[in-house]
Amino acid sequence: MESYAISRIGYVAASALFIFGLKMMAHPRTAVRGNLVGAAGMALSMAIVLWGLPSYLWVVAGLLVGAGVGVWLALRTRIEAMPQLVALLNGFGGLASVFVAGGALVGARMGTEELFATAASAIIGAVTFTGSCVAYGKLQELQLFKKPFHVPHRHLINAALIVVLLLMTWLLIAEHKWLYVPIVLFALGLGVLLVNPIGGADMPVVIALLNSYSGIAAAATGFVINNYVLIISGSLVGASGIILSQIMCKAMNRSLTNVLFAVMDASKSQISADSTYAAVRSTTADDIAMILESAQRVVFIPGYGMAVAQAQRAVRDLGKLLEGRGATVEYAIHPVAGRMPGHMNVLLAEADVEYDKLKEMDQINPTMDSADVAIVIGANDVVNPLARTDPSCPIAGMPIIDADKARTVIVIKRSLSPGFAGIPNPLFARENTLMYFADGQKAVLDIVNALKQL
């Protein structure tokens, strides 16, 4: 009885650490400390579990293998590939819930509530796993996932799968435990079908939603094994993921159902790339340096291309050089720039850019017309004026950063290839825009060198 009470007190303490850690991670200045507080909560939870076990052999072996894989992934994953890693972690979390709930089903006598929670864990966890694998393939631009494969009557098939899963859940509750494996298999297929048609531009929303699914699956598993800290931590992850998904959808001016069930077709746009880019003007590092020499206010607008080129430190150096010459430097952050929520914030924080200089879209847009120079590096869809002018394009109605309103716009890009939405960008051919075709990091370093020579 005494050990039971101590474990429950420990779980409450661990849950409190999770809550405080999550609160601290809401602000960049306390995010690292919050991460450590959350890790301490997880360590406490694991210690309590180990304390109550008669044998540590298999658990310690699993911990060592898992820790080894985690360290290997963390060391080999480049910062620009962080969205792919997050997608995989979401998937592994869902798969872990499937195995834990399945193991509990085999080894224990369960009531109706536990059986329902077991089925819920299997369905949500399996959907999370395969959905996350598809999301990883899209983010990694693997050939198999570059374009969604066609599934005729996909909504009807998805609806039929959901009905079958609900029916099998009812039968599982009626003590047909062997249905657990078919439930997992059908849910794995459902996860693929749900994420397959979603476009790459919507991946920030999908990652946040899959993160929520992994938390809900963990909470359901907590009910299966009667683990309070798993219920609380899973609920926190589930709720925060849903909230973040809604924030992302608001930033895109779309509903969550539209993201999940509507197919965005770039071919519907009536604007062709050939006509759009007829008046594109290219420039050089020396010309850009002369423009920046007299600029009083410069706004950097980063995108995924900056991550691919690992140009965040070069951008920071250019920003500091401009500030040393008396210019005001800011960084305009679009909520869905990059491949996951907060992607640009993470990159710039990693480069030690002061957080106060990062301006959200709603903050920066009202003053973009007073910017002398807007430097777009690797961004495309989030600065595309078609969102305001072409109701037939995939990003129609999406709020964008008003880069086109700056006095001079410099776009650093390898080529005129489209962004994830697959449509041309008229910003590149505007009268106040100059294109600098080069690798992002090399381009910025060349500008820094040219500016130092003036």
Image (cartoon, rainbow, N blue to C red):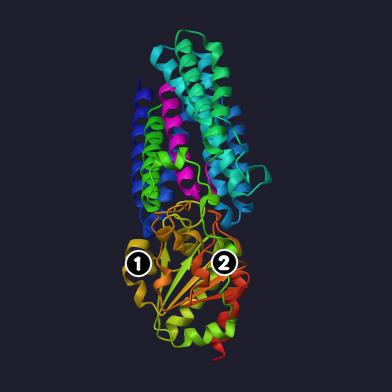
Q: In which quarter of the image is the C terminus?
A: bottom right
Distance of mark 2 from mark 1, alpha carbons? 28 Å
Q: In which quarter of the image is the N terminus?
A: top left
- Which secondary structure lies at badge 2? helix
Q: Is residue 154 above or below residue 275?
A: above
Q: Give residue 277's quadrant in the image.
A: bottom right
Q: Give the range drawn in magenta.
A: 198-226
Q: Which amino acid does label 1 sit on?
A: Asn
Residue 365, label in figure: 1
Depth check: give the residue in front, 440 or 278: 278
The answer to which image quadrant residue 295 occupies is bottom left
Asked whether the viewer can see residue 43, the reply is: no
Which labelled disc corresponds to residue 275? 2
Q: Does the magenta stretch include residue 95?
A: no
Quarter of the image for residue 87 reads top right
Residue 218 included in the magenta stretch of the image: yes
